[in-house]
Image (cartoon, coloured by chain):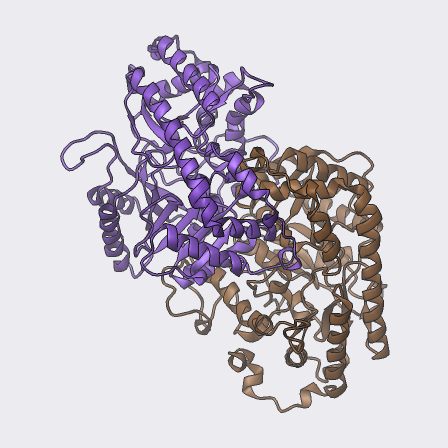
Chain colours: A brown, B purple
Amino acid sequence: MFTLPQKDFSAPTTCLGPTCLQDLGSSHGDDLEGECSRKLDQKLPELPGVGDSAMLSPNTSYLSSRGRMIKWFWDSAEEGYRTYHMDEYDENKNPSGIINLGVSENKLCFDLLSWRLSQSDMQRVEPSLLQYADWRGHLFLREEVAKFLSFYCKSPAPLRPENVVVLNGGASLFSALATVLCEAGEAFLIPTPYYGAITQHVCLYGNVRLACVYLDSEVTGLDTRPFQLTVEKLEMALREAHSEGVKVKGLILINPQNPLGDIYSPEELQEYLVFAKRVWAAWGSNVGLVQVFLLSSPHCGGEAGIWCFFLQDFGMSGLRFGTLYTENQDVATAVASLCRYHGLSGLVQYQMAQLLRDRDWINQVYLPENHARLKAAHTYVSEELRALGIPFLSRGAGFFIWVDLRKYLPKGTFEEEMLLWRRFLDNKVLLSFGKAFECKEPGWFRFVFSDQAHRLCLGMQRVRQVLAGKSQVAEDPPSSQSQEPSDQRR
Amino acid sequence: MFTLPQKDFSAPTTCLGPTCLQDLGSSHGDDLEGECSRKLDQKLPELPGVGDSAMLSPNTSYLSSRGRMIKWFWDSAEEGYRTYHMDEYDENKNPSGIINLGVSENKLCFDLLSWRLSQSDMQRVEPSLLQYADWRGHLFLREEVAKFLSFYCKSPAPLRPENVVVLNGGASLFSALATVLCEAGEAFLIPTPYYGAITQHVCLYGNVRLACVYLDSEVTGLDTRPFQLTVEKLEMALREAHSEGVKVKGLILINPQNPLGDIYSPEELQEYLVFAKRVWAAWGSNVGLVQVFLLSSPHCGGEAGIWCFFLQDFGMSGLRFGTLYTENQDVATAVASLCRYHGLSGLVQYQMAQLLRDRDWINQVYLPENHARLKAAHTYVSEELRALGIPFLSRGAGFFIWVDLRKYLPKGTFEEEMLLWRRFLDNKVLLSFGKAFECKEPGWFRFVFSDQAHRLCLGMQRVRQVLAGKSQVAEDPPSSQSQEPSDQRR
């Protein structure tokens, strides 16, 4: 292993803990990129320098050191995604193809969304939408976002359009926030397991790290449930970061928690907020807490500093829409200044505004139908798992289940986790393994259940086949190839 | 003036020359942001540190040093834009409002574009467009882009979709390219006057500078026309950069030249290419020449390294579309990896593909009509200028005219240029002054003529009024306020 000649590009992840090698990116989707690709198909970078001569193409002298790093994130995941993409399941054209339960997209309501987006009120094309506009987003859209959030988040007072900034997705929002809040090399605290792509989002442009607060599934002492975040753990991780000379600028909380499928209670959020205020106020800063909410979160009202909303669970990742809400005008303005690189088409802004303002359709059609379909899918997968005697966590938030397959790993290693993941993929079902979420315990997998029944059914059938025949993964003859999957797969 | 406590954020522009203070950004449009806002309305940053205590809001301790810089770019231009935005001309609602001849947008064909984008073939909303997709862009779009460029650029061999990367506009493309090609603090050569917003685009995320090749209007010796770029001038600027310890990684050429309204000849491009190859091959790099073409450029075939195409002259800046074409797969991949932050909605990608593949409409309706309207507008403004005895450059490329108003500046200073620009604005017509393009000669202004006849007519009438009454700008009593327009205007 060698270290890239890095002039100004630090490690892409804090790795304050020993096993922080993660999240190698992909060309395909925020989530896939971070979580279900063949992450370990390439030699992973070592820290604090990043890079292995084997994984760099020989002809990259025209890229800067950070350019090579950025390219490496693509290459390594591209390698992994290729298997899936070359053999994608299609009911008619490729029924033996790979079923994708790895990408956290809600695919259950495309019929409803397609119908709504095809209505005549969506088709307005007027000059103002084709011209340069306010980089924060058109005012008509920011007004709708503010109203929408006020209503669905039960805000005590109406939220204000001037606190809204609209961007082309959550990835962009992380990138912009990391850049304007942190210096290069500084970090955010984040509890693990977490949505792995965030590592790239704060790092690729911003060169910001994540300082992991490692949680585990054990329920002892003050921990009343698995992977419970406590202020004590936050403080410990913060101390550790400090001891390693890393300056931590804030705490990132994702709600609902991905991959845990849980939400923080108002009481918990209050505790974390008190912690954040205490820590960062002492540093002369009143940021400190970046809360990220998906739209379904019931707890996004409150006094936290920065809220970010994505559209993942509106079932339209491909529409590219995300929004920042903050009463901190300096942060809003700085992010807005970067929005010239994260702008949405005026036509899409118009469609989003039309969608958000159609409360009748949202309340009477979309939300109930989406809820019913999600519930049915969740019930199906949960019952399948119960029938298999497999423990799992799922408190009903998000559209994924965090599944405990530790009993299928006799030695309890990440190598076994990877092997099991590969068994699934070889049996044509793509899942996400825990390592990609920086989970400290090998053997956890995320199952995304927000897919059509026939695909879900087939996917679970393939999962069952693997688990039935492969309860002794580690007893298979290990080869150097299977330890180095990239060689095997190329 | 003081220097921001900058840990890792270098000066936002090279400023290898003494007067490189420019391009202060805006919330409104690539072009407006760089070129027609009240750039000097705020104290400008000094180099190599950037920042003046007066221009930083007191409450920015939660922003990083680069965050403050990024915010500053917004604030300073926001200040300038406000005047225009608060008093925008509207034929019916605000006929005494400001006419905008400052933003280089083509507003002549919104009727055609609106019609085309409203047709039923544009309204497809299918699941694949609502899901995560290849960050390079959907294949169907990249195929159409390759075909479109092959055809309209008369490429000797068909261009290939795998060399195409699609992004949400030209600003993003500059940001991504600068980041993957350069280390922080490195630079690109660029001839002046140039489209000023590029300064921000390479700097805000990438912390890359511009090393200016200062051209002037004098025609002597080898210069056969004003603002002529020669290899000798490129070499001189490169030497100067080296002598100041700045590493230059490539040359940016914009074609058609903005604000000059000219295009480089094939012979010239060949000379610059030879220069670039000689310089950067010696450094073990085969990049070196970043050519930026608007779609109307007839010269984008060739062997240069990286081509970028925007949609400005398709008259749809608000659609947010730009594309990279390069045969250098490493560069394409690295840029694609950053495209997770520059993604377009699947719906817009579909519409763009539909538009690009409709050759009948483009060839028989859009291009001829657009050409005729541009020509009429150009003829009108040129004749107005000739009648006023005002020299100008305009070789028929782009939709702007580079106007020589030096005779209206008795002392020939940038202060007078700013005063004249303000006279125009006070008389309700917004133009762009030469300083914003880093022009070394005070007194040049860019007139954008691609607007409806009645607005153009009114705008030129207001210009005439100012010039008729204000040939002695510098004789007006200067006040400290008028020297500090930000104070005056706030």
Q: Is residue B438 above or below residue B208?
A: above
Give the x, y percent position of residue B273: 26, 52
Say which quarter of the image contains residue B302: bottom left
Q: Is residue B321 above or below residue A68?
A: above
Q: Residue at x 45, y 67 (%)?
A: A3
Report the side of B242 relative to B258 (left or right): left
Q: Residue at x 34, y 12 (%)?
A: B474
Q: Is residue A399 above or below residue B436?
A: below
Say which quarter of the image contains residue B413: top left
Q: Residue at x 84, y 62 (%)?
A: A375
Q: Residue at x 75, y 77 (%)?
A: A405
Give the x, y percent position of residue B178: 42, 50
Question: In which quadrant will I find the C terminus of chain B?
Answer: top right
Report the side of A215 relative to B351 (left or right): right
Q: Mark yes or no: residue B175 visible.
A: no
| In-front residue for pair A52/B38 | B38
Question: In which quadrant will I find the N terminus of chain B?
Answer: top left
Q: Is residue B419 above or below residue B305?
A: above
Report the side of B216 relative to B67 (left or right): left
Give the x, y percent position of residue B350: 57, 52
